[in-house]
Every structure is written in structure tokens, then in C-alpha cells.
């Protein structure tokens, strides 16, 4: 019986250098180039983004209290084969979905509407509830928080459609 490979999103944070793996992004041209070795070089108008650990990236990219992006970042959504560029200062909606168990219906790159079903939640009494989106926009980041261990907690960041640049990748380079 054949199985489909599970695809994971990747996240890259704006940096002056690429330490191991990263992206060179030229937003004017709408081009993203993957880089598989350290570099400080980028053509004029381009930005460097360093890969970081996805699950904890929210600590580097967003002020949860102010609901603003603190560092520009790019999320690669492999199911759409596209890169989502979000600039520093962008206002976001911070959504927390929690319950005994949480089953998400959305992922990075999905457009959601206010009132749309985005998850099922089971409670401690094993009741099933529908969680509806409190906002409209593009899911730009989603992670399952590891604390607390007694329940599922998902953190989603949603940005307005006009605040997200959808970019396509180019061939990898050895620069």
C-alpha cells in the first residue's frame, strides 16, 4: 500500500547573513532562491532570510501582545509550492485554539473567512465542538504549543491578504 509523503512547512527569518541554509528574496522581481551554505552576499534589492526552527519561530517573529510582526519572515508552504513573505510591522490576528484534543482544518497559505470552521475541539467531557475563525485573512504561521501538556493548544497568525506576498521559488544556488 503506497503512502503520500507528509510535507512540513519551513520558516526563514530576515537576517544579515545566512548561517547554514536560507533564502535570498527579491520582492521586486517576486523571486526566491534557496541557499544551502553560509552567505552574506545578495544583489541590490534582495534580502537574506536564515532558516530557524519552525515550532518556536513565533518567539522571533511576532509580538503576541501588540499583534505585530517584529521581524520580516518567509514561510514555505510545500502543499502550494509557494513562499509567503510577511514584512516587519505587519498587523496580524493572533488566534489560540485549545481543547483536550484539537483537529485543525487549515494550514499555512490557506485563506480563511470570519465564521469559517477551522477546527474541531474535544472537551474534557468528550464533547465535540466546532471552532470558527474570528478573523479573515491568510494563515501565515501555525504551530502546536508544547506547554501545557494536559491539552492541545494551537497558535495561528493570520494576516490580511494585502499584507502577504506570495512568491515562487527559483533553482537552488551554491552561492
Image: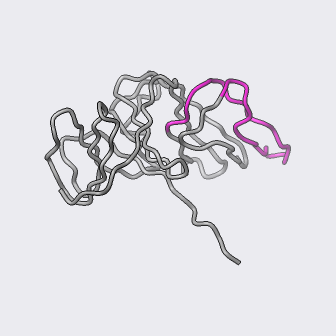
Q: How is the rendered protein coloured?
A: one colour
- The magenta stretch is 113-140
| Quadrant housing residue 43 | top left
Residue 139 position, x and y percent, is 55, 35
Q: Who's the residue at 40% across and 47% down the image?
A: 11
Residue 126 part of the magenta-drawn span: yes
Residue 118 position, x and y percent, is 70, 37
- The residue sitting at the bottom extreme is 1
Q: Is 160 displayed left or right of 38 in the figure? A: right
For the N terminus, the image quarter is bottom right
Q: Is 88 displayed left or right of 103 in the figure? A: left
Residue 161 part of the magenta-drawn span: no
Marks counted in the figure total 0
Residue 81 position, x and y percent, is 48, 49
Q: Who's the residue at 58% across and 47% down the image?
A: 148
Residue 13 position, x and y percent, is 32, 42
Q: Is residue 78 above or below residue 140?
A: below
Q: Is 49 displayed left or right of 97 in the figure? A: left
Q: Nearer the viewer, residue 94 or 140?
A: 140
Q: Is 24 displayed left or right of 61 in the figure? A: left
Q: Who's the residue at 61% across and 24% down the image?
A: 136
| Quadrant housing residue 29 | top left
For the C terminus, the image quarter is bottom left
Amino acid at each position: 500500500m503506497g503512502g503520500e509523503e507528509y510535507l512540513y512547512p519551513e520558516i526563514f527569518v530576515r537576517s544579515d547573513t545566512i548561517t547554514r541554509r536560507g533564502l535570498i528574496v527579491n520582492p521586486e522581481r517576486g523571486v526566491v532562491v534557496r541557499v544551502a551554505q553560509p552567505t552574506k552576499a545578495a544583489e541590490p534589492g534582495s534580502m537574506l532570510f536564515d532558516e530557524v526552527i519552525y515550532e518556536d519561530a513565533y518567539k522571533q517573529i511576532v509580538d503576541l501582545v501588540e499583534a505585530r510582526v517584529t521581524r520580516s519572515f518567509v514561510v514555505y508552504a510545500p502543499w502550494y509550492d509557494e513562499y509567503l513573505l510577511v514584512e516587519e510591522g505587519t498587523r496580524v490576528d493572533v488566534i489560540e485554539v485549545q481543547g483536550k484534543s484539537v483537529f485543525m482544518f487549515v494550514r499555512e497559505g490557506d485563506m480563511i473567512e470570519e465564521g469559517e470552521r477551522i477546527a474541531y475541539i474535544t472537551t474534557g467531557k468528550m464533547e465535540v465542538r466546532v471552532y470558527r475563525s474570528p478573523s479573515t485573512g491568510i494563515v501565515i504561521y501555525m504551530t502546536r504549543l508544547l506547554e501545557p501538556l494536559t491539552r492541545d493548544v494551537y497558535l495561528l497568525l493570520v494576516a490580511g491578504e494585502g499584507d502577504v506576498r506570495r512568491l515562487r521559488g527559483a533553482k537552488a544556488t551554491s552561492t
